[in-house]
Amino acid sequence: MPKVALGGTFQYLHDGHARLIEKAFELAGSGKVHIGLTSDEMLQKNHSVDDYENRRKRLFEYIKEKGVPEERYEVTRLSDPCGPTLEEDFDYIIVSPETYPVALKINKIREKKKKKPLEIVYVEYVMAEDGIPISSTRIAKGEIDRHGRLKKEA
């Protein structure tokens, strides 16, 4: 049964996050998805981000709404970008263009430790109406909504 890793801050749970999460569960099949959720201590954002517990609660609610049984996933606190991927074995790691370099670093470290590399599954950005990627930063600035629709100027 496949074991899939995915990590992120998941501030606004926008359509880009949805695509990453869907891909993780698709690859896991009857296996398990391990979601590393960025800890408050690790945050380095240029906009305000809710605390870990609020983001964790919303993530659980989102996955529950998708009808995924709790035994098919777990959410753990990430205190560093690599999380458990350096020690535990996973079949896949799901990444966005933003997190792809971290997956390459993880595999380099795993290689030095004589562990098998993780298969990196690259998921392209989801674009907003204006052709620019949807991001939590853009949502925080009020440019777009979670689905990439442009917010009208007042």
Image (cartoon, rainbow, N blue to C red):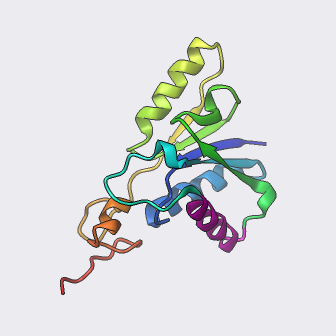
What span is colored magenta in the figure? 53-67
Residue farthest left in this picture: 153
Compared to residue 24, the image places residue 120 above or below, namely above
- Residue 154 percent coordinates (x, y): 18, 87
Residue 135 visible in rendering: no
- How many discs appear? 0
Residue 40 visible in rendering: yes
Q: What residue do we see at 56% from left, 56% from top? A: 52
- Residue 112 percent coordinates (x, y): 57, 12
Q: Is residue 51 left or right of residue 30?
A: left
The verdict on residue 61 being magenta is yes
Q: Nearer the viewer, residue 67 or 1?
A: 67
Q: What residue do we see at 46% from left, 33% from top? A: 102
Name the magenta segment's main secondary structure: helix
The verdict on residue 82 being magenta is no
- Residue 84 percent coordinates (x, y): 65, 34
Q: What residue do we see at 36% from left, 74% from top? A: 145
